Amino acid sequence: DVKVTQSSRYLVKRTGEKVFLECVQDMDHENMFWYRQDPGLGLRLIYFSYDVKMKEKGDIPEGYSVSREKKERFSLILESASTNQTSMYLCASSFRTSGSNEQFFGPGTRLTVL
Amino acid sequence: GNSVTQMEGPVTLSEEAFLTINCTYTATGYPSLFWYVQYPGEGLQLLLKATKADDKGSNKGFEATYRKETTSFHLEKGSVQVSDSAVYFCALSGGTSYDKVIFGPGTSLSVIP
């Protein structure tokens, strides 16, 4: 079974702190994605990566950065956390062959910024 | 650009009722269509998919047919169970953006005994 793991299920941080969210997948997927999920807004794509050291901005990249040093690991970084970044963060991965490929999701990290 | 619209929730049904969740899409090219499900406290998982017009995806008693003429991919189940309570997301991928998936806003379903 494909497994996508995220470093924390719940995280509480203070405004201004630097926050790292880690995601690891074990299926040798080329593509990895970070989304945030908010009530009434569904999933919004923050960043994605289709190869090691490659990254592309999604729909809401402001206030975030990412790092992909190894194929299996994709990190989301909040340089200076703010209260409006309180949300559920979901990581996903997929093969890079065609648009018909399934994305596999991690369980999510619920981040609260105080 | 590509987009997905799905019916507003929440939807509350009694056990064994018939379920329909409407989904329509806008896309250029020939997208693949998906339904994902999110059970409480979990990430999303693929429920079913269809990759070309008139394809029917099915899984766990759920079905959806890719209708290009009406740009729709409605989710149906003949008899829902309490365990089907979850949030359902319609999504598309492909067309002009092969690697990204566009998700609808989600429809929350509660099934009561």
Image (cartoon, helix red, strand yellow):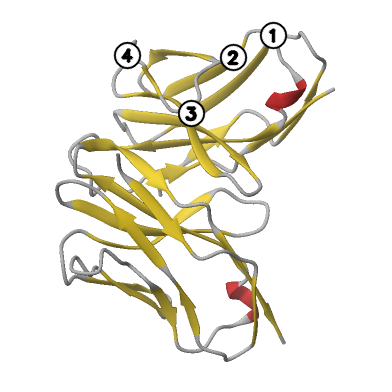
Q: Which residue is mark 1?
A: A80
Identified by mark 2, the residue type is: Gly
The quarter of the image holding the C terminus of chain B is bottom right
Identified by mark 1, the residue type is: Ser
Examine the rendering and report whether any part of residue B54 can be seen.
Answer: yes
What is the C-alpha distance between the residues marked 1 and 4? Answer: 23 Å
Please identify the quarter of the rendering in which residue A59 is found. Answer: top left
What is the C-alpha distance between the residues marked 4 and 3? Answer: 16 Å
Task: Say which label, 3 or 2, has the lower sequence index.
Answer: 3
Task: Say which label, 2 or 1, has the lower sequence index.
Answer: 2
Q: Which residue is mark 2?
A: A63
Task: Say which label, 4 or 3, has the lower sequence index.
Answer: 3
Place of residue A95 in the rendered image (x, y in percent of width and height, measured from the top left): 27, 37
Identified by mark 3, the residue type is: Val
Identified by mark 4, the residue type is: Met
Query: Which residue is painted at 58% across and 91% down in the image?
Result: B16
Other-residue count near label 1 (Cα within 10 Å), few / some / many at <14 / 14–19 / ≥20: some
Q: Is residue B16 left or right of residue A66?
A: right
Q: Is residue A45 left or right of residue A16?
A: left
The answer to the question of whether label 2 and label 1 lie on touching residues, with beta carbons closer than 8 A, is: yes
Query: Which residue is painted at 17% across and 72% down in the image?
Result: B54
What is the C-alpha distance between the residues marked 1 and 3? Answer: 23 Å
Closer to viewer: mark 3 or mark 2: 2
Q: Which residue is mark 4?
A: A54
> In the structure shown, which secondary structural element does the residue marked by tag 4 occupy?
loop
Closer to viewer: mark 4 or mark 3: 4
The answer to the question of whether label 1 and label 4 lie on touching residues, with beta carbons closer than 8 A, is: no
Place of residue A62 in the rendered image (x, y in percent of width and height, measured from the top left): 54, 16
What is the C-alpha distance between the residues marked 3 and 2? Answer: 22 Å
Examine the rendering and report whether any part of residue A2 can be seen.
Answer: no
Place of residue B98 in the rendered image (x, y in percent of width and height, measured from the top left): 22, 38
